[in-house]
């Protein structure tokens, strides 16, 4: 089964799951083995003379990581917890407690519990510290080890000791692991407009987008004025789900093409592969993008933009135009390898340059939006070069100012506007529908 993934390394990409083919060695030139002599010489010298003893597994894993790092920022080898995290990215569920955690001075700190999970129901709160798991002291240990211990088979029990700032004594909690299902799509109705926030592209994203449209219609009792599809800070995910989401809003035509190493290695994907027609019934669609909109998200934005089906609004997207294929490498390991570039229906590659919004709208409700450091694909070491030779004018598009967006964050806050880009998108749809606009708080 082929499942391409579009995501950036820590946050963005296009992915595919494929079996390892016996013909994979066909691409290896016999002369390549001569180069391995140098590698083995270095390997043996390290084994024999390094200041401390090093095991074979450490050296081989480091060699693999170095080889893939020499290719591009998105090719990598995943095993152990990294492999588990990769599965969660694509499948959208795991066995555990529903906690997002970090490490602070050697202690496991709770960032937040996920709504309606064992952690949330037990009363674990943001800012809590986990000091013991099943009676074992974990402070000073690795974060990965703690996460692995908290995950596990649904239905199994786990005991946590929680230190809560301000509490007189540690809290003892007994929880039962469950299947934690991530919610890739959230929706609500804002001023008669259907707001669909897509935060990742897992195996359920396409189906959940269809459900969001149905639920919006049900809540209103009729079709909305239009839809805002929010892809901001969406680092990507499965290529198949990017196609499925695009299909929801397109009645026909190409969505994306995937092109490999050879000239004739081209695969095209079209609308109506998942649902017939345009489920939005031709109503106005605005797609919100920002510098965190990457890969699979850029496929959706590019498809709707090229077909003139949606107005892309925000700032230039991340600019990751490559597809990674997931090659299984054993029971709990996989090779994530860049195998193709993707192109929008018009034949445009977003690599380096990203998706240029139809309407540039900066997030002026963010006080430091002008000063914050922004990292895009073009900033990553060893990133693929765009064959279209994107010029600097495109890459620096976000530096331009517009007199329409001169209000300060403080002025907007007084008007009750804490997300200016979304506010502007809602107003734009209202204008297109001829609806009178009233400034209200809480947008």
Image (cartoon, rainbow, N blue to C red):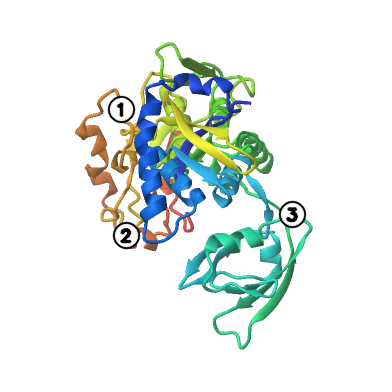
| Quadrant of res 210 | top right
Image spot of residue 172 (x, y percent): 70, 78
Location of mark 1 (residue): 386
Q: Earlier in the sequence, mark 3 or mark 2?
A: 3
Query: Is residue 434 found left or right of 187 in the rendered image?
Result: left
| Quadrant of res 399 | top left
Q: Earlier in the sequence, mark 2 or mark 1?
A: 2
State the residue in front, 213 or 423.
213
Location of mark 2 (residue): 367
User: In percent of the image, x 35 and y 34: which residue is there?
Assistant: 354
Task: Name the mark on residue 117.
Answer: none
Quadrant that contains the N terminus: top right
SS label for mark 3? loop
Q: Is residue 299 above or below residue 187?
A: above
Q: Can residue 286 be spotted in the picture?
A: no
Location of mark 3 (residue): 153
* Residue extending farthest top: 264
State the residue in front, 22 or 324.
22
Image spot of residue 153 (x, y percent): 74, 54
Image spot of residue 345 (x, y percent): 43, 19
* Residue extending farthest right: 155
> Alpha-carbon distance for marks 3 and 2?
44 Å
Whether pointer 3 and pointer 1 mark residues with C-beta atoms closer than 8 Å, the reply is: no
Which of label 2 and label 1 is nearer to you? 1
* Residue extending farthest front: 48
Mark 1 Cα within 10 Å, few/some/many (few <14, many 20+)?
Answer: some
User: In percent of the image, x 36 and y 58: which residue is there?
Assistant: 412
């Amino acid at each position: 089964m082929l499942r391409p993934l579009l995501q950036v390394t820590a946050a963005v990409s296009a992915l595919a799951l494929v079996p390892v083919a016996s013909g994979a060695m066909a691409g290896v030139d016999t002369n390549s083995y001569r180069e391995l002599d140098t590698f083995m010489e270095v390997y043996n010298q390290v084994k024999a003379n390094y200041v401390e003893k090093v095991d074979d597994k450490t050296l081989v894993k480091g060699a693999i990581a170095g080889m893939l790092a020499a290719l591009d920022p998105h090719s990598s080898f995943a095993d152990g917890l990294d492999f588990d995290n990769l599965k969660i990215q694509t499948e959208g569920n795991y066995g555990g407690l529903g906690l997002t955690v970090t490490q602070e001075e050697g202690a496991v700190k709770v960032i937040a519990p996920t709504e309606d999970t064992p952690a949330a129901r037990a009363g674990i709160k943001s800012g809590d510290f986990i000091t013991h798991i099943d009676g074992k002291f974990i402070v000073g240990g690795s974060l990965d080890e703690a996460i692995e211990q908290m995950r596990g088979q649904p239905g199994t029990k786990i005991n946590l000791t929680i230190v809560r700032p301000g509490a007189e004594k540690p809290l003892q909690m007994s929880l039962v692991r469950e299947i934690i299902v991530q919610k890739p799509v959230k929706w609500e109705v804002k001023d008669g407009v259907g707001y669909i926030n897509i935060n990742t592209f897992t195996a359920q994203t396409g189906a959940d987008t269809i459900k969001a449209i149905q639920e919006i219609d049900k809540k209103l009792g009729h079709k909305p004025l239009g839809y805002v599809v929010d892809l901001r800070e969406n680092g990507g995910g499965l290529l198949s789900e990017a196609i499925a989401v695009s299909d929801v809003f397109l009645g026909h035509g190409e969505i994306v093409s995937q092109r490999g190493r050879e000239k004739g290695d081209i695969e095209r994907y079209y609308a109506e592969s998942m649902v017939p027609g345009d489920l939005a019934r031709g109503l106005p669609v605005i797609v919100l993008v920002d510098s965190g909109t990457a890969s699979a998200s850029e496929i959706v934005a590019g498809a709707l933009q090229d077909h003139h089906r949606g107005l892309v609004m925000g700032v230039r997207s991340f600019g990751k135009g490559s597809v990674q294929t997931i090659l299984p490498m054993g029971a709990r390991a996989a090779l994530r390898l860049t195998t193709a570039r993707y192109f929008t229906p018009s034949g445009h590659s977003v690599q380096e340059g990203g998706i240029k919004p139809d309407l540039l709208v900066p997030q002026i409700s963010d006080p430091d939006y002008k000063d914050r450091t922004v990292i895009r694909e073009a900033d990553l070491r060893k990133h693929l070069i765009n064959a279209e030779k994107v010029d600097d004018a495109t890459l620096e598009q976000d530096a331009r100012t517009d007199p329409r967006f001169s209000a300060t964050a403080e002025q907007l806050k007084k008007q009750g506007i804490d997300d200016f880009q979304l506010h502007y998108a809602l107003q734009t749809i209202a204008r297109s529908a001829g609806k009178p606009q009233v400034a209200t708080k809480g947008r």
